[in-house]
Amino acid sequence: MNRLTRDQMAARVARDIPEGAYVNLGIGLPTKVGNYLPQERDIFLQSENGLLGMGPAPAPGKEDWELINAGKQAVTLLTGGCFFHHADSFAMMRAGHIDICVLGAFQVSTRGDLANWHTGEPGAIPAVGGAMDLAIGAKQTFVMMELLTKQGESKLVEACTYPLTGLACVGRAYTDLAVFDVGADGARVVEAVEGLSIDELRVLTGVPLAA
Amino acid sequence: MIDKSFVSAEAAVADITDGAAVMIGGFGTAGMPEELIDALIARGVRDLTIINNNAGNGESGVAALIREGRVRKIICSFPRQSDSHHFDAAFRAGKIELELVPQGNLAARIQAAGAGLGAIFTPTGYGTLLAEGKETREIDGVHYVFEHPICADFALIKAQRGDRWGNLVYRKTARNFGPIMAMAAKITIAQVTEIVPLGEIDPEVVVTPGIFVQRVVAIAPSATNLEQAA
């Protein structure tokens, strides 16, 4: 089976981010999207810890540990970028000033519920960070994930079994095998990798999928 | 003459007592007032409630406070990190209470305290474990969770420059929770790289007005910090 690499998934998400968009990229896999944004587009990357106009990682040795991203990695500031405090940063999310956020996921339901913060396992130490604010706040919430777990279970599900991050908040899920729109009308296949049919996707996911 | 500057970190934290609620600025180590925390540890106070975004990184700052067994409860959004071993151990041993708050709700609840609001309705967390048992309300078709302000006896924050009236400017993403914690605590103690004469900070760019700051301490950046900021 054809399968997109994580970098190919990031490049695919980047294609859908338009000129002028204010975008927050979650930690982990979504951070890679920043590497594939077309140079000719002005796209504003926001980081929850208080910057707009986030640039790429600095050259080795040029790190400034007071200029970091949400994953606490050193970054740079583009010309025209700015800093602000945490309450303003989360106002940008919660009130929908951020156009698009891209988040990782454990599970997404066909109606757009998201589970990405806690496995719920006994003894697991929970940590939520900004995930809940981003998921429900941005105008559009995209998810990036492998479609199947290592055990072959679908992460696109009818109802999430992991603890929820937000209800009915995801609009689109980009995976290594297909792109899905999700929401009140259920899941629809936007595109699939070459050679993979919708019927095969229905078998893999076990959920109803519209063409 | 009003002069809010203190001679040392030790002097600035000298009246923080057992059981105090203390906000500590910083996102990870960016903006964390390490020398003020060291002075707090040296005072030997216990049973603190700490409000911070994280629950300590590595060996210094909030991590050291937890390692030394000084923290009874922590209110934070993201305790579990690759280098949060001191929190992890204390939590698993049942030695520390955790109130986990989504990061935006943490900021909004701190801001509400600083703004004198009785409570807030926030959409974040609705329908999740973190809103279980909490009052909710539907307003114009959106579901909100009722959340109380987070107040504190003290805030320990780090800024770049301050003056003797307490006006502050910050440096890059070390700003994070500083401005809102300064507003929310009864006593705000700011560690700054430099105390400058009144008027030297452009009034148009003051980020935290001096009314929110009670004490300012100049701490020369350590060799490590200088290296990091180079």
Image: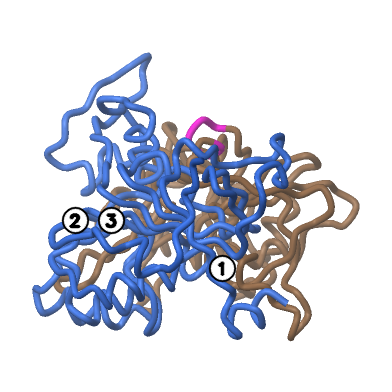
Chain colours: A brown, B blue
Name the residue at the top extreme.
Answer: B140
Residue at mark 2 to residue at mark 1: CA–CA distance: 40 Å
Instruction: Residue under label 2, please give it.
Output: B20
Q: Report the predominant secondary structure element of the magenta stretch.
A: helix
Residues in magenta, as a range: A92-96
- Identify the amino acid type marked 2: Ala
On the picture, is B7 further left or further right than A159?
right
Residue at mark 2 to residue at mark 3: CA–CA distance: 6 Å
Question: Which quarter of the rendering shows the N terminus of chain A?
Answer: bottom right
Q: Position of residue A69 (x, y in %)?
A: 59, 63
Q: Position of residue B107 (x, y in %)?
A: 40, 44
Whether residue A107 is visible to the viewer of this picture, yes or no, is yes
- Decide: marks 2, 1 in contact (CB < 8 A)? no
- Please give the name of the residue rendered at 23% of the width and 61% of the height, measured from the top-left corner: B74
Instruction: Residue under label 1, please give it.
Output: A29
Depth check: B91 or A100 in front?
Answer: B91
Q: Are marks 3 and 1 on the same chain?
A: no
Instruction: Residue under label 3, please give it.
Output: B22
- Decide: marks 3, 1 in contact (CB < 8 A)? no
Tell me the crowding category of disc 3: few under 14, some 14 to 19, or many 20 or more residues within 10 angstroms, Cα based: many
- Decide: marks 2, 3 in contact (CB < 8 A)? yes
Q: Tell me the chain of label 2.
A: B
- Please give the name of the residue rendered at 61% of the width and 43% of the height, measured from the top-left corner: A100
Question: Residue A153 lies in what quarter of the image?
Answer: bottom left
On the picture, is B85 further left or further right than B73?
right
Q: Secondary structure at mark 2?
A: loop
